[in-house]
Image (tube, rainbow, N blue to C red):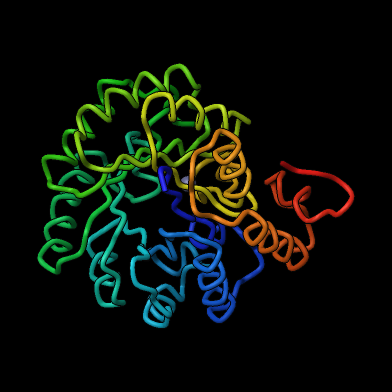
Amino acid sequence: MNVIIEEQGLRDGFQTLSTIISTEQKLAYIDRLVNAGIQRIQVASFVHPRLVPQMADADELCKRINKKEGIIYSGLVLNLKGVERGINAGLDHLACSISASDTHSQKNARKTLSEAKAAFKEMVKLAHQNNVKVRGGIQCAFGCRYEGKIQVLHVLDMVKHHLDEGVEEIALADSTGMANPQALQDLMQEVLALAEDKPVILHLHNTENKGLANVYAALLAGVRYFDTAFGGLGGCPFIKSATGNIATEDTVHLLHQMEYETGIDIGKISALSKELESLLGHELQGQLYKLWNKTDIKVV
Ligand code: ZN
């Protein structure tokens, strides 16, 4: 595989749904996504159940996953309590994330940026003491709906901060969908140079319909890890007008057309999106699943 996809539908996607997805249903989705070739999957976030009710079963869910060897099952954590819960739930990979925007940080994690950085240090320390790998994330790296443009030097400083804390991976999130291909390509080249041999993951939202253009720009910069969500699910409860992630099947289709390998079966992912569409009773934001399983047209 020369491009690795991390499926985010179970976390970034389900957290925004008003229909509650049961633990049993989530377990079935995890199995089927892995069966479709997904090698990395973020299954839950360890946040307060009152704030994000869809994630209230995170602990039970993680304990019950039928884990397959070689697959990374991770959880999103925003504070020390989350790290403790993730460890106790048996995860060996956690995404610790702080926001590049002070305002978003206060809304999402109830911390100023400097408080978030101090907490991040403790989170990484606790994770590492328990042999848990840390993906160090930066939310709103390409723009914030409250603050507008985020300065490139500020983002690079945060990348350095995460690397200094010893994270195993760096993840930049365009949580608001404000990134544009040119700026993204320029920034990612610098991030990849800083990260050296550590994986650099890009988390893109399609809010302004630039998601796949940004994937292409990131590929040109050398990025080979992307977060996606089946059906284009996703959003953030604490960002105004947030919409879905780039869709797994749409992104994988683009990658396969350009002869990148992902190991992912688009048909299987599209079938999941189609089923979820029926369950929710409305169309999802992804495009490809609407074409894939038709018999009267060709998709190549
Ligand atoms: Zn997201």
Q: Is residue 253 visible?
A: yes
Q: Nearer the viewer, residue 78 or 281?
A: 281
Q: Is residue 143 visible?
A: no
- The x, y position of residue 164, in whole percent, is 11, 40
Residue lying at 52% horizontally and 63% vertically, measured from the top left: 10
- 124 left or right, relative to 270: left
- The x, y position of residue 63, in whole percent, is 37, 81
- In this picture, is 191 found above or below 62? above
Q: Nearer the viewer, residue 38 or 19?
A: 38
- 142 left or right, relative to 270: left
- The x, y position of residue 112, in whole percent, is 26, 41
Q: Nearer the viewer, residue 160 or 7?
A: 7
Q: Quadrant of residue 265?
A: bottom right
- The x, y position of residue 219, in whole percent, is 44, 30
Q: Quadrant of residue 212?
A: top right
- 183 left or right, relative to 170: right
- In this picture, is 249 found above or below 51? above
